[in-house]
């Protein structure tokens, strides 16, 4: 726990609030569509789908804001995108009450994993260079997507990048803010940003009594808990560690697991530590002072709550936003964090090979057994690290003889 316990009024900054806003924009523009695809696969009604969106956003908002306030760290939580991807292919095989029962069991399993502390102990044994390489690999696609947008929308990309570099020389805290303004202004000119027609109104949650069946527990709950823990919570802890924080893994994972359990009857499939989007609010772009970046977590929580309450309008809005605009916003916001992570990953020469394997595996986007590339990057990076250390240890032993 940090020593400082100042209030947000003393620590608030435009850069931190903007970081929280961009985090929610990026999270809701892409991952939310995976949730909608899963809801469609499960043949959910419009009310049930809106309730799912409400639970996903409100759960992320409450846990992120509460944990950021309590720990004074920018704890960014989100709904499980890998978990939703698993549900796209399997939710249709079960009734909705059975799925809700599986969501509840999955939340309990994740809470139990957090309570034991074993997961956090394993993560703390991972060399810092491998953790930084994993983060760089996770963020790699966002940088590539930003420059890939040059092909179809060069003006927003060049305007955002030029503005970012120009402002960063004089006022680094506001570089992302001005880059965002430049990207939106350029998009409005070419090819044109059209105001969407969306339904405005409050979204209300719908309670569904859970049903527990062995098939749903095995087919939904266990895979959901595994992919969420491996593909979200592991890199989520890694992001915080790579940015210089010492997260209390028991508190964070247990809290998100319990939140998932509580929200299951309202349609929430899983709340977890954010990985990719968390990097927007945990790096220097949010604030130069690490002790004041928790405001970004509070702001992110507030924006998530607003998104949940207006879930129907949110879905319509983000469905029509130009993809290149989201790519530019995310790419610019993550540029500094990516460069810092990459530098840290290759700084330690003896561990450089393991870091490179971690980076390349994570950046590849490979998914094996339903588990994402971030987890496999950690696994292969650790195996490389262990193999090289054993070889070096044997070499030193021969030299001593």
Image (cartoon, grey):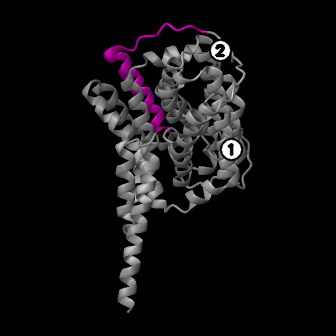
Quarter of the C terminus within the rendering = bottom left
Q: Does 157 appear above or below 51? A: below
Where does label 1 land, which residue?
111
Left-right relation of 380 to 228: left
Confirm whether residue 17 shows in the render: no
Q: Does 216 appear above or below 123? A: above
Quarter of the image for residue 299 reads top right
- Mark 2 surroundings: few (<14), some (14-19) or many (≥20) residues within 10 A: some
Quarter of the image for residue 323 reads top left
Confirm whether residue 123 shows in the render: yes
Asked whether 268 or 59 is in front, the reply is: 268
- Location of residue 202 in the rendering, given as x and y in whole percent from the top left corner: 66, 12
- Location of residue 263 in the rendering, given as x and y in whole percent from the top left corner: 69, 29
Asked whether 271 or 13 is in front, the reply is: 271
Q: Residue at x 64, y 51 (%)?
A: 249
Quarter of the N terminus within the rendering = bottom right
Which residue range is magenta in the image? 174-200
Where does label 2 land, which residue?
203
């Amino acid at each position: 726990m940090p020593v400082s316990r100042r209030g947000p009024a003393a620590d608030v900054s435009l850069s931190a609030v903007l970081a929280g806003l961009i985090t929610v924009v990026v999270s809701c523009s892409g991952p939310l569509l995976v949730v909608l695809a899963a809801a469609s696969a499960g043949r959910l009604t419009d009310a049930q789908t809106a309730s799912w969106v409400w639970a996903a956003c409100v759960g992320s908002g409450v846990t992120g804001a509460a944990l950021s306030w309590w720990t004074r760290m920018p704890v960014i939580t989100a709904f499980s995108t890998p978990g939703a991807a698993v549900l796209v292919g399997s939710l249709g095989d079960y009734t909705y009450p059975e799925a809700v029962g599986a969501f509840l069991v999955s939340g309990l399993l994740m809470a139990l994993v957090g309570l034991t502390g074993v997961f956090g102990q394993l993560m703390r044994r991972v060399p810092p260079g491998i953790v930084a390489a994993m983060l760089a690999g996770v963020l790699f696609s966002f940088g590539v997507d930003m420059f890939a947008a040059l092909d179809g929308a060069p003006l927003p990309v060049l305007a955002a990048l030029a503005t970012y570099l120009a402002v960063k020389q004089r006022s680094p805290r506001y570089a992302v803010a001005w880059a965002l303004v430049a990207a939106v202004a350029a998009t409005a000119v070419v090819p044109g940003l059209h105001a969407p027609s969306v339904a405005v109104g409050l979204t209300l949650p719908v309670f569904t009594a859970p049903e527990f069946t062995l098939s749903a527990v095995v087919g939904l709950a266990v895979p959901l808990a595994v992919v969420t823990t491996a593909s979200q919570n592991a890199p989520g802890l890694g992001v915080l560690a790579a940015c210089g924080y010492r997260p209390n893994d028991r508190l964070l994972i247990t809290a998100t697991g319990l939140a998932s359990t509580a929200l299951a009857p309202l349609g929430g499939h899983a709340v977890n530590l954010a990985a990719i989007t968390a990097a927007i609010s945990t790096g220097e772009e949010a604030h130069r002072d690490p002790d004041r970046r928790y405001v970004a977590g509070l702001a992110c929580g507030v924006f998530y709550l607003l998104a949940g309450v207006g879930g129907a309008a949110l879905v319509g809005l983000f469905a029509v936003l130009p993809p290149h605009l989201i790519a530019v916003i995310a790419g610019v916001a993550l540029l500094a964090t990516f460069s810092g992570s990459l530098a840290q990953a290759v700084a330690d020469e003896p561990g450089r090979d393991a870091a490179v394997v971690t980076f390349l595996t994570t950046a590849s986007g490979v998914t094996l057994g339903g588990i994402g590339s971030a987890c496999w990057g950690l696994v292969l990076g650790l195996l490389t690290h262990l193999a090289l250390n054993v070889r070096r240890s044997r070499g030193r032993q021969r030299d001593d003889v």
